[in-house]
Image (cartoon, rainbow, N blue to C red):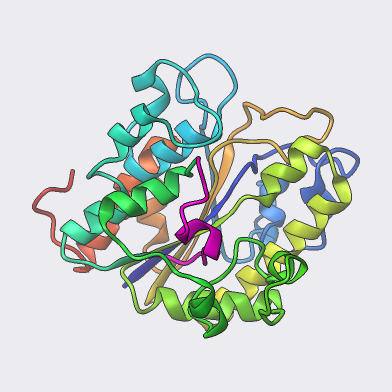
Amino acid sequence: MSVLMIFVDGIGIGGNDPDTNPFARARTKRLQAACGRLDRPELRAGALVIPTDATLGVDGLPQSASGQTTLLTGINAARQVGRHVHGFCTRALAGILDGVSLFARVRRGGGNATFANAYTPEFFRGERRFLSVTTVAMKQAGLPFRNLDDLARGEAVFHDITNRDLRERGHEIPFVHPEEAGRRLARLALTHDFTMYEHFQTDQAGHARDMNKAVFLLEQLDLLLDGVLGVSDPDKLLVVVASDHGNVEDLTIRTHTRNPVPTMLWGTGREVVAGRIHTLADIAPALLRYLRARGAINGSDLA
């Protein structure tokens, strides 16, 4: 049994108002339950949806770096460093991540983990001064990064899903329909015990208060999920959509929100996993317990 975590930056559960919340306007099937209509089970499209606290008991607005560190480790990073940390991984957050991220713990437990996103040549040339939490966690776990050759072979997915950004930057990479990208992501996940895919453009659209862009991105994500779920056996793949903080669900403001974020699960065993999740700090431990119970990893050092 494998786990695929689709991490979507900056999506919270907001009001059912199409004037302010793109979730309420976008034509989606899988993501409709994330727009505040949790009382309508027909909108869940087979998913369990858990409103998940991203504030972590710390004053101020939740932020990306501390939220993602918490999501990957099960450690309340904002509380440990005394504040919510925005942007890229700091030295303090790297210290929290080291050896205890999902990537590291799956590997240490005898399983295989991977990050599905493809990196550009600029990354491998060391031209990025600041690194994301996910990138730091991968480096610490000693796992290989996927590149544009992997992407061309269908063994990776770019952060924009379709490769449109790469093509606009001059890379000769074929356009990929979102559903096909989802199928590729599912096939990759089924060959690993834990796979993570990251999409951060939703957070950018929220900060820009760009309704059209936000609706477009949510519809693309929904098609990606269609592709994933269309080719994956629920007895073999647990699919988890998770986020780090709210933002795009309220376009009346440019900042993050204190809204709960939707944790969405598809697959056998989702009820047990869902029952353990209340805050961002619960997600990593719940997934590790699930993988251990399914025999994908051993539990010698797992909480």
Residue 193 vertical placement versus 36 (above, below): below
Residue 145 vertical placement versus 39 (above, below): below
Please indicate whether residue 71 sits to the left or right of residue 243 in the image: left
Look at the image and tell me whether residue 168 can be seen.
yes
Q: Nearer the viewer, residue 30 or 207?
A: 207
What residue is rendered at 19% in x and 63% in y? 297
Residue occupying the far left of the picture: 300
> Residue 278: where, in percent of width, then height?
43, 37
What residue is rendered at 34% in x and 65% in y? 144
Look at the image and tell me whether residue 76 can be seen.
no
Q: Quadrant of the N terminus?
A: bottom left
Please indicate whether residue 203 sits to the left or right of residue 7 in the image: right
> In which image quadrant can residue 3 be found?
bottom left
SS majority, magenta: loop
Residue 31 vertical placement versus 69 (above, below): below
> Residue 18: where, in percent of width, then height?
88, 45
Counting labels gives: 0
Residue 39 vertical placement versus 174 (above, below): above
> Residue 163: where, in percent of width, then height?
68, 71
Q: Quadrant of the C terminus?
A: top left
Q: Nearer the viewer, residue 196 or 40?
A: 196
Does 291 appear in magenta?
Answer: no
Residue occupying the far right of the picture: 19
Does 119 appear in magenta?
Answer: yes
Residue range highlighted in magenta: 115-129
